[in-house]
Amino acid sequence: MGLLCEETTSLLGCDRTTIFLWCGESYRPIFRRTNLPDMAQPFASVRLPADAPLIVEMEASGGFVAINNTGVDAEVRRLAELARINSMVLAPMVRSDGSRLGFLSAEFSEPMGDFDDHRGEIAVGVARLAQTAVLTDEDLRRRRQADLGQAVILARLVDAEDGERRRLARELHDDPIQRLFALRIRLETAEATQKPIQLQDIKRLIAETLATTDSLRSILTDLHPTAIDGKTLGTALNHALARRAESSGWSVSVVDDNTTQPPAANLTVLFRIALQAIQNAAIHASASTVAIHLRTVDGGSEVRVSDNGCGFDPSGVNNDRFGLTTMSERASSAGGSFRIKSSPGEGTEVTAWLPNSELSTS
C-alpha cells in the first residue's frame, strides 16, 4: 500500500498521497507517501469524523471531490494548515455492502498545482485499486485467523484423543489385563504342580474368565461405531450409563424426550460429549446419582448430563483439562452450543445442543 501511494504521487505529480481508513469513529491516515518528513507526525494525528463537511461531500459525490483552494472552508482550512495542504482531491473507498472503508487523498502542499477532472478520475481509479487491496488483505487476515483457530482446535482434539487412549490403556491395565494375568498365574501353577483341578476351581476360573470378557466388552462397546450403530441416542447413552453404574454404584436415569433424532454425524458428537461428561463424573464427582435428559428444542437435539457430586468452579479449571475443552469444541465445530453449570458442593450439569441438520462443508 505504501508503494501504491508512492506510485500515485509520481503519477499525479503531486506532493503527497495518503490512504485513510475508517476506524470505527473517524478516518485515520494509515498509508502515505510524503516529501515533508517534518510533517509525518502531525499528519499521522489527523482524525476526520464522518460528519466533517469535506467527508460528507466526498461520500455524497460517489466519485471524487477536488478542492483547489483550501482556504475557502473553515473545516478544510484547519486541516490544510495542520498538514500544509494547498489543494487536494479525495476519492472514497467502500465495502461491498456500501459501508465506509476509507478514502484516498492526494495533495499539493504549495500553490504549484491543482486537480482537474483528469487527475480526479486517476485518483478514483487508484482508490478502487486500494479498496480491493485493503479488502483482500482483510480477507487474508480473517482466513489466517480462522486457520489458526482450526489448528488450535485440532491440536486440542488430538491431545484429547491421546488422553482418551491413555484412559483406555489405564482401564485395560487396571482390570482386564490384571484379571488375565491372575488367570495365567493360576493355570501355570496348576500346570507346574500337575495337581488335578477341582470342579470348584474350574468354576472360579470360568467365572473369572467371564468377568474379564465382560470388562473388555464394556470398554470396547463405548468405542465408536459399535456403541451407537443402529441405536437411537437415548438407547446408546442408556447402555453406556448402565455399564458405568455397575462399576460406580450409581443410581441412574435416562429420560428421552427427543421427537426427532439428530443426523448420524451429530448423534456421534452428542454421544461423545455425553460419554465424556459421564467419564468426568466417574473420575472427579464422587457422585451417587447421574441423570441424562434428551429433548428436541429450537430445531435441534439437546443432551443434558447432571450429577449430585462434589461440583467445582468452572472458571477455575486449568487449561490442561482437555475433557471440558473438547466437549465445548466438539459442539462448536458441529454448529452447536455447550454450557456447564456447577459450583462446589452443588453437583454438575453439562448441556450440549446441536442443530438437527449437518453443516455444509462446501
Image (cartoon, grey):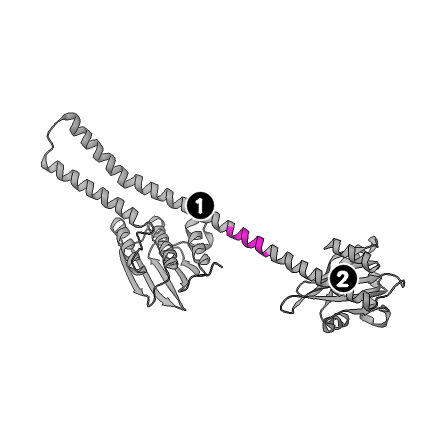
Question: Position of 19 compared to 67: left or right?
Answer: left
Name the quadrant of the N terminus: bottom right
Q: Which residues are magenta?
A: 142-150
Q: Position of residue 163 (x, y in %)?
A: 40, 45
Q: Is residue 53 left or right of residue 94?
A: right
Image coordinates of residue 136 in percent, x first then y, are 64, 58
Which amino acid lies under the numbered mark 1 shown in the image of this protein? Asp
Find disc 2 in the rendering and name its residue.
Answer: 46
The total of numbered circles placed on residues is 2
- For image coordinates 36% across by 51% down, the residue present is 280
Image coordinates for residue 53, horizontal then vertical, percent: 76, 72
Precedes in sequence: disc 1 or disc 2: 2
Q: Is residue 274 left or right of residue 123?
A: left
Can you say whether 196 is above or below 248 in the image? above
| Residue 34 is inside the magenta segment | no
Question: In the figure, 172 relative to 70: above or below?
Answer: above
Q: CA distance from mark 1 to mark 2?
A: 49 Å
Image point (33%, 41%), residue name: 170
